[in-house]
Amino acid sequence: MPEDRALALVGLTKRYRETTAVDGVSLAVAPGEVVALLGPSGSGKSTIFRCISRLTAADAGEIWVLGTRMDDLQGAALRAQRRAIGLIFQQFNLIGRVSAIDNVLAGRLGSVGMIRATLRAFAYADRQLALAALDRVGMLDKAYQRADSLSGGQQQRVAIARVVAQQSRIILADEPVASLDPTAADNVLTLLRSIARERGIGVLCSLHQTDLARRYADRIVALKRGRVVLDTTAAAIGADELARIYHVVEGTPAVQTMAVAEVSRRRA
């Protein structure tokens, strides 16, 4: 694997009985790069994330994380490499009854151990790191507020602070703005892209909103039936390509909307 890649997949394949969910997928993400993963439901996006994080074992192919082949690792070596991977989900995965800072400190679990984390016996340095992460996402004033009292956009910012405190080198964001309103979605993706740039973090982000992918990603990788059908810069993708990815019939409102967006983008 080239040393300048944060993440690389080579021929990744995953089958569930007679169904091939991911079929020979190859892609790469550079440090500081945001890659959007597009495709209809069932195209294999979430399965790819599960394979990268080793929540699911791939059947074939290679997974390279920061120059180390992830699918070869076991035990302590696997746990250590997983610390470099931050996960952001559609449903935030926060503990609602505890404060924002306690949720961010969960990002330190891999470094401090389960017993200290259960007792909330975090070192001063860990707490300062968590506060700095909350400050970076604009949530320092909410540090001691219960997570379930925050808005959806605020909760997702806390989730981003958690992966920052984890000191992740790669972020896997699985539909991170699917449950947010347009303004909150823009804010979250702006923040995610900014953090990727300033910290050199490679981001692989699955999205259904094609307009957001084109605005915030550097590259777009599109899947169809578990295979890569498009890998190009976000600036180069047009309405025709998007229509083919999502099986949209020419002349339907969806295609017309994408075509209008394409014309507007080129005029801007």
Image (tube, grey):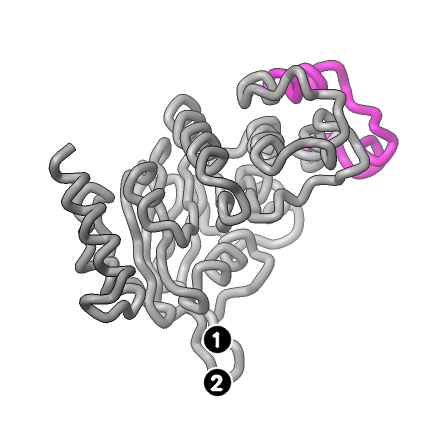
Quarter of the image for the C terminus: give it. top left
What amino acid is labelled 2 in the image? Glu
- Tell me residue 175's x, y (percent): 49, 50
Q: Look at label 1 and name its amino acid.
A: Arg
* Farthest residue, direction left: 267
33 or 92, nearer to the observer: 92
The numbered disc on residue 15 is 1
Task: Return the residue nearer the eye: 233 or 186.
Answer: 186
Residue at 73% from the left image edge and 32% from the top image edge: 149
Vertically, is 164 above or below 2? above
The answer for how far apart the CA atoms under marks 2 and 1 are is 7 Å
User: Residue 136 falls in which quadrant of the image?
Assistant: top right
Residue at 19%, 49% in the rendered image:
260
Residue holding disc 2:
18
| Residue found 41% across the figure and 45% down from its top | 204
Q: Provide residue 156's location: percent of width, then percent of height.
A: 58, 36
Say if residue 166 shows up in the picture: no
In the displayed structure image, the side of residue 131 where residue 29 appears, left or right = left
Q: What element carries label 2?
A: loop
Tell me the SS state at disc 1: strand
- Label 1 near label 2: C-beta < 8 Å? yes
The answer to whether residue 103 is left or right of residue 23 is right
User: Residue at the location (13% across, 39% down)?
Assistant: 266
Q: Horizontal and vertical percent for residue 141?
A: 66, 15
Q: In this view, does 125 lie to the left or right of 198?
A: right
Main secondary structure of the magenta stretch:
helix
Question: Is residue 144 shown above or below 33?
Answer: above
Give the magenta-colored segment's residue range.
111-132
Locate residue 192, reporting x and y percent. 45, 32
Residue 20 drawn in magenta: no
